[in-house]
Image (cartoon, grey):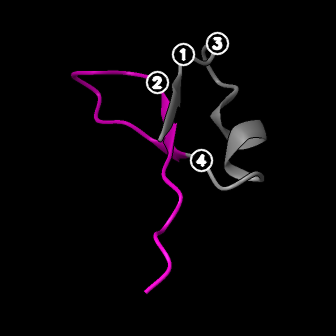
Amino acid sequence: MIQLFAAANKSGFYQKFGFEERPEAAPGMRWVKERDA
């Protein structure tokens, strides 16, 4: 899992790389690698 803080209005840049926005109460972005089954 990778988590980061993105500058305001910059989340779209990170979404291109698979990051998703965290809840508004805990702002930032996160990326979680899915485990192989």
Q: Which mark is residue 20?
A: none
Q: Nearer the viewer, mark 3 or mark 1?
A: 1
Q: What number is the disc on residue 28?
A: 2
Q: Are marks 3 and 2 in contact (CB under 8 Å)?
A: no
Q: Residue at x 46, y 70 (%)?
A: 35
Which residue carries the number 4 mark?
19
Which structural element holds mark 3? loop
Q: Given the image, on which type of amino acid does mark 2 rest?
A: Gly
- The first of marks 4 and 2 along the sequence is 4
Q: CA distance from mark 3 to mark 2?
A: 8 Å
Q: Earlier in the sequence, mark 2 or mark 1?
A: 1
Q: Hey, what amino acid is under mark 4?
A: Phe
Residue at image coords 28%, 35%: 23
Whether the residues at callouts 4 and 1 have beta carbons within 8 Å, the answer is no
Instruction: Identify residue for label 1.
Output: 5
Q: Are marks 2 and 1 in contact (CB under 8 Å)?
A: yes
* Total numbered badges shown on the rendered structure: 4
Whether residues under marks 4 and 2 lie with C-beta atoms below 8 angstroms apart, the answer is no
For image coordinates 48% across by 52% down, the residue present is 32
Q: State how far apart marks 3 and 4 are (Cα).
A: 14 Å
Taking the view exactly as shown, the residue that stands out farthest to the left is 25
**How dense is the environment of label 4, judged by Cα within 10 Å: few (below 14), some, or many (20 and up)?**
some
31 or 21, nearer to the observer = 31
Pick the residue in front: 27 or 18: 18
Height in image: 10 above or below 19?
above
Q: Earlier in the sequence, mark 3 or mark 2?
A: 3
Q: Give the residue number, with chain letter if any, for mark 3.
A: 7
Q: CA distance from mark 2 to mark 1?
A: 4 Å
- What's the magenta region? 20-37
